[in-house]
Image: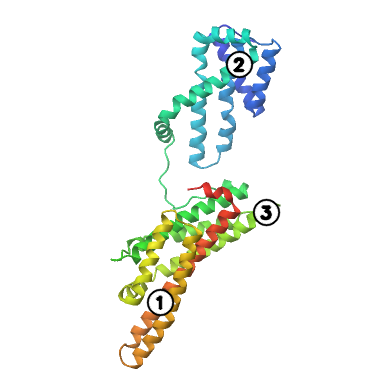
Amino acid sequence: LPSGSVLGLLALAALGAGLTVVMQSSSAAMALALVMIQSGAISLTQAVAIVAGMNIGTTCTALLASLGGSRPMRQTAVANLLFNVATSLIAVPVLLFGLGALQELAVRTNPMTAILVFHTGFNVVGAMLFLPVTAQFARFITWLMPETPKTRLVDLDRALLSDPVTALLAVQAALELLEHRVYGAMASALQVPADYRGIAALSPCRTALAEVEAFLADIRLTADHARQEVALSALLHQTDHLLRLLERLSQTGRISVLKEDPLLRRPAVITGVVLRRLIEGCSTDAEQARLQRLAVLVNHRKDRHRRGLLLGEHAGLFDLNEVFSNTDAMRWLTRCLHHLERLEHYRQVTRAALPVARAMP
């Protein structure tokens, strides 16, 4: 093996990278280097160059995994490559100025310990150098591989279908994004004064839900899939209730009637407050129970209010159109609350079936 010259050391680094690429395991390649230095087949200088090359070669696995993947996957793989190349360059000053210290450590202990200290050291030093500039490094990667403008609300990568758990988690994240958008639009419409701009901008959500439905239909569960079946069923229910809620929200005339009725204005406004809490991350059993209590309250008031309207119509206090509009508005709010309560219920079911989903934003 070459040694001494700069070209020789570069050749050794390329050899280390090549070994790691072929083995697809930096641990196995490192073990090979340790065996070689322990047996005296290579010197400490040669081992340093080979190990530096192995640090670059280990990025090949990530690069291969990112092929055909989404842009964030490719950006992460390139960031991994550049980080490992930069940390491997730390070997250059070690070879120029710190080789004596490594050789002294090898004499006091053994060559294997010296090379392990070097390998751990340049990775730790590299992490310490990059941590303060992580944000700038991320911006550089984004500039190097710019993101294409998003034309869709959700972008479910078909490559994720190879792993059903990952695919289910991706759908859960997409549905939570869509739910937050729908909740926000509904909360704005139920506030005083009402703001219907969010509801008017919900048409992309229907397209996104169609994509979610198609993606769910293509998920193939593994043999041991009891928990996956529960999660898939819950996600299908979430999608269905979200579609139905979108249809309800297109009936903005119902909201106007609710705001004009003193008896129903309060539960409508409270519903908007609960939606705000859900958007802020308060999706708990307590909020789900609050939605259930609110649905029972509104349903009770609906029955009582409808009887009062019918009696008032007979007495000539209300006209028939007013009775129908109020009844329809109360039924609208009751059904919306039902969809919201079911959405939160199935969200909790999914999180219980896929515990890792709790860590997702």
> Which amino acid, by three-letter code, is at mark 2?
Ile
Q: Going by the picture, which residue comes out furthest to the front?
A: 286
Position in image of residue 22 (x %, y %): 65, 26
Say the numbered circle drawn on residue 351.
none
Q: Earlier in the sequence, mark 3 or mark 1?
A: 3
Position in image of residue 336 (x %, y %): 44, 69
Nearest-to-viewer mark from 3 and 1: 1
Q: Residue at x 37, y 80 (%)?
A: 326
Tell me if residue 119 comes above or below residue 140 in the rendering: above
Tell me if residue 305 comes above or below residue 115 in the rendering: below
> Which amino acid, by three-letter code, is at mark 1?
Met
Location of residue 26 by image quarter: top right
Nearest-to-viewer mark from 2 and 3: 2
Image quarter where the N terminus lies is top right
Residue 261 visible here = no
Residue placed under numbered mark 2 in the picture: 115
Residue placed under numbered mark 3 in the picture: 225
> Which amino acid, by three-letter code, is at mark 3?
His
Residue placed under numbered mark 1 in the picture: 330
Q: Nearer the viewer, residue 129 or 196?
A: 129
